[in-house]
Image (spheres, rainbow, N blue to C red):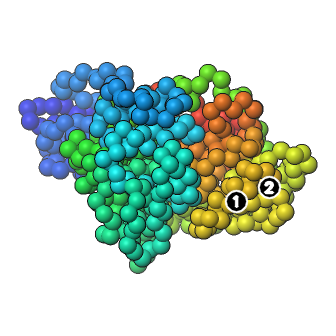
Amino acid sequence: MKKATKVGDKIHVQFLVPSKEFANTLNQIKFISGRRWDASNKMWIVPYKESTVDYLKNLGFEIIGVEEEKPLPFIIHNPRKKVDLSLLPSGLRPYQIEAVEFMEAVNWRGFISLAPRMGKSVVSLCGWMLHPEFAPMFIICPASVKINWQREIYKWTKKKAHIISGTQPYKLPDVRFYIINYDILADWKGSLPQFNYIIVDESHSVSNTTLTKSVNGKSTRVPVQRTEAFRTIAKNTPHIALLSGTPVTSKIWQLWVGLNSLNDKAFPNEYAFKHRYCAPHHDGFGWRFDGLSNGEELYAKLSKYMYRKTREEVFTDLPEESHDFIQVELDERAFEADLKDFREWYAKHKDVSDEELEIKLSSFASLSYSKKRTSIIEWISNFCESDEQIVVFAWHRDVVEDLHRAFKKKSVMMYGGMDANKKQKAIDDFNAGRKQIFIANIASAKEGITLAGANTVAFVEFPHTPGDLEQASQRIWLPGKQNKLNYVYFCAVDLEEKRIDKLRERAKILSRALDGKDTEIMVDRVREYLEEV
């Protein structure tokens, strides 16, 4: 029993829970500011606040004496403003024109959340086509797509763009378009001119305000420099286009940075946002914000700032997909030894943050590759007997390099830290058909590139987030492509089942917030297979 009763300007809190839950529930109540224990009536008394009511609801308390708010309409309220189509490129699809009209209505301060491969870049460049006074423009993007952005800008505007490089600022040429990658943004933030319009490609790259680091053996939160740099630049920029097919890759609170940059009055406080929309709970060590609360309200608010379309909403002729799962036998003794090491580590570090745990899980999971390697190489060798191209995704750089060595003559590779020109050459060589296999780590190749010469993707390792899996899978799809798309997963079930469970759980939460419904994505099909086996 968990009950909270409003009495005047106070809330009376009582609970009777199993002994194993008592300490955790007590800690959660003690976190409420202004609480006091009423020993005579055996209850906690806390000040009445709407935020406290939301908090208690999220903890599973029955709320008595508080009138329920009327739910906001669970519909999209995207504004539109007609534009002069003669100023835009010919051949824009109807949904792209809608996106331009939405951005015009919000004064070019909004999210353009089109699914991967649906033309976000040209929509964002339409801002300059309609408003030449927006120049100079600033594009922030992953390093792997800087050259691609330079090509896109010339394709649509016939203007040259300058790619900013290096960590040492220098005098910039007088052009209308500048391109910079996230990795060096913090180095340049104090040396950049004032921009009228910034395009933030893959904007989820600046969704974390802090990260966890170990300092003197203790976990501590430190600011994320690229996010701080982006927020500094965005603060005085009148027009901002945030581009991402997956504006949230893992958790709902990742929306806050973008929303705050668009309207800091409506979304002034990250802490308040998390407590309102991210199902807060205190586990005895600290706050967790892993879920979704007040989802209908958030969905309605997002519609004022985000134009979003999925592939399924736009295209009726999507190609057929197949999903094949290769269950790989593991060396049980080696696996149990690895598992024992992990359990011993976890027993001593149960208070670690989600980020630290995921890093450790990733390191542990990488051990599975050596146990899957023989099956993976054999399968790829058999596949290459045909003339078809294939994209192979891994998570770890050492796995990418190992597979590239195994197929040196037939493959190109791409991983984080590579020179941008080398990355682009790998992409161009593959798309030109000069190489049969494109091997990449997911983090570096999941965004902004096209590998549509292939119809098959093989995942030899899984990422941390459902957004990463979904983005990577779409590299081989283009609008109008009719070839059947094939996805192959090498699953060490005993090791990777819990990771798939976590991906699936997060995917459902993100879909409810962004699309207002539970949407089946690729990770669900992976989970269904694991349940069958």
Q: Which residue appears farthest toward the bottom when viewing the image?
A: 216
Q: Position of residue 123 (x, y in %)?
A: 45, 38
Residue 41 seen by the camera: no
Q: How far apart in space, not on screen, are marks 1 and 2 (Cα)? A: 9 Å
Which residue position holds label 2?
435
Which residue position holds label 1?
426
* Horizontal side, residue 353 vs residue 489: left or right: left
Give the camera-side residue of 269 and 413: 413
Residue 441 position by quadrant: bottom right
Point 26% across, 36% down: residue: 54
Q: Are marks 1 and 2 in contact (CB under 8 Å)?
A: yes
Q: Tell me the crowding category of disc 1: few under 14, some 14 to 19, or many 20 or more residues within 10 angstroms, Cα based.
A: many
Q: Quadrant of the N terminus?
A: top left
Point 68% across, 55% down: residue: 427
Q: Position of residue 210 (x, y in %)?
A: 37, 61
Give the camera-side residue of 275 and 455: 455
Give the camera-side residue of 147 and 71: 147
Mark 1 or mark 2: whose residue is earlier in sequence: 1
* Horizontal side, residue 269 vs residue 527: left or right: left
Q: Amino acid at mark 2?
A: Lys
Q: Position of residue 100 (x, y in %)?
A: 40, 33
Kind of element beneath mark 2: loop
Q: Is residue 74 above or below residue 337?
A: above
Q: Quadrant of the C terminus?
A: top right
Q: Amino acid at mark 1?
A: Ala
Residue 268 seen by the camera: yes
* Horizontal side, residue 521 vs residue 205: left or right: right
Q: Is residue 196 above or below residue 420?
A: above
Give the camera-side residue of 505 and 451: 451
Point 35% across, 58% down: residue: 230
